Image: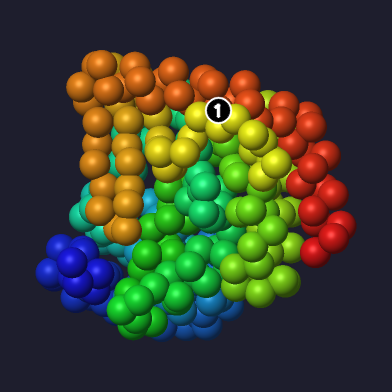
Amino acid sequence: MDDSRDWEEDSGDFLKMVGRQVKLWREQAKLTQPELGQRIGYGDELVSSVERGRRAPKPEFLDNADEVLGANGLLKAFKDDVERTRFPRKVRDLAKLEASAVTLGAYCDHNIQGLLQTEDYARALYQMRRPLLNEETVERYVAARMARQEIFTRWPAPILSFVQEEVTLRRPLGGRAVMRGQLERLLELGRLRNVEIQVMPTDREDHAGMGGEFLLLNPKNGPTVGRVEVLGFSRVITNRDEVRTLEAQYGIIRAQALTPRESLAFIEKVLGET
């Protein structure tokens, strides 16, 4: 699949149109980008990206901008349509599942799991894609991944657990500065009351995760589903027997990994070595 076409064909033009509207209302109000950003609680770089159509504005951005700029609801009216452009097609269903999940469990073996990634780490991953992605596509993928992390601030809070292979903590993807920031982010998230991060040490002689990484989601109004992804191709698993197998696997993997408390201490140790 051509990743640059992973959004609806006209979504790029639509975001540029929304950005032009924000810019027109800002200029009419005689505000600079930094001044608008300060008044609505966002950085000037984000305001610039929205105005150029490179970032999809969050609903709160449009609500606040509408009020500050006196747009009389014209900017707020874009919210529903903008929301549909925030995610590429192949992760749109995943984002919906995550948004309704009451529990989520993920095992990741080659890089930090997407929900745990910093913006710099995610950008580094997309920039090393082959074939190469253009910068606009990279930024849109990064924005979509960051938007999914709203799951950490949602209430009622879902129960989230992650098992990361030790190698994912030590492989300096994006460079050592990026990796330090990523390890600090893991410590920050791992201390949340509804989040448990576990590390699977490389020296384990028995390992139930040799089949590769996967995700388990239990939505509020439906049965648990699984998701596996290989080389960019993903599959959602709804067959109950297959889901039970993944649930059993995940339980064993968690039992074989370090405890959450031990894992945070391990991550702190790796951070000190980075």
The residue where tag 1 is placed is 253
Foreground pick, 107 / 122: 107
Residue 44, image x and y in percent? 55, 75
Q: Is residue 217 above or below residue 273?
A: above
Write down the quadrant of residue 101 in the picture.
top left
- Write the residue at 56% across / 32% down: 207
Amino acid type, callout 1: Ile
Residue 268, image x and y in percent? 82, 48
Q: Is residue 160 above or below residue 11?
A: above
- Write the residue at 45% across / 75% down: 128
Q: Is residue 228 among the parts visible in the rendering?
A: yes
Q: Tell me: 243 left or right of 194.
A: left
Q: Is residue 23 among the parts visible in the rendering?
A: no
Q: Please tell me whether mark 1 sits on a helix, a strand or a loop.
A: helix
Write down the quadrant of residue 246 in the picture.
top left
Q: Tell me: 105 left or right of 16.
A: right
Q: Residue furthest left?
A: 9
Q: Residues within 10 Å of mark 1 (few under 14, many from 20)?
A: many
Foreground pick, 59 / 229: 229
- Write the residue at 56% across / 52% down: 112
Q: Tell me: 132 left or right of 261.
A: left
- Write the residue at 72% across / 27% down: 259
